[in-house]
Image: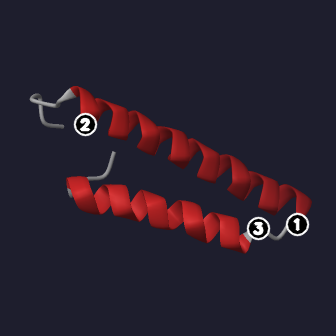
Amino acid sequence: MNEDLTENDKEIILYFKMIQKLSNDVSELVATDDFMMTGVLESIEKQIDFIKDIYKTDF
């Protein structure tokens, strides 16, 4: 990662990590409870893709 991150960059990275964790948690819920939340998962994945596109990186 770039060593010259601003405070805003750090907040966005933290936000991304929170979304990623939420996505993983929801995926586990869907897998274990057969609970259909496809729209929620797609929304979270779009947010993750958007942040990855901004920073052109995988965290």
Farthest residue to the right: give it.
33
Residue at the spot of label 1: 34
Quadrant hosting residue 8: top left
- Residue 33 position, x and y percent, is 90, 59
Is there CB contact under 8 Å for labels 3 and 2?
no
Pinpoint residue 5: horizontal percent, then vertical percent: 16, 31
Q: Is residue 20 left or right of residue 14?
A: right
Say which quarter of the image contains residue 38: bottom right
Q: Secondary structure at mark 3?
A: loop
Foreground of the two, 25 or 53: 53
Precedes in sequence: disc 3 or disc 2: 2
- Amino acid at circle 2: Asp
Real-space Cα separation, disc 3 to disc 2, in angstroms: 30 Å
What is the secondary structure assignment of the residue under circle 2?
A: helix
Question: Which one is nearer the viewer's eye here, 9 or 24?
Answer: 9
Q: Which is more N-terminal, label 1 or label 2?
A: 2
Q: Which quadrant of the structure image shows residue 32?
A: bottom right
Total numbered labels placed on residues in the image = 3
Q: Point out the frontmost of discs 2 and 1.
A: 2
Residue 37: image tag: 3
Q: Are marks 2 and 1 in contact (CB under 8 Å)?
A: no
Residue picked out by circle 2? 9
- Eye-nearest disc, 1 or 3: 3
Number of residues whose C-alpha sits closer than 10 Å to that of mark 1, classed few (under 14), some (14–19) or many (20 or more)? few
The CA distance from mark 2 to mark 1 is 36 Å
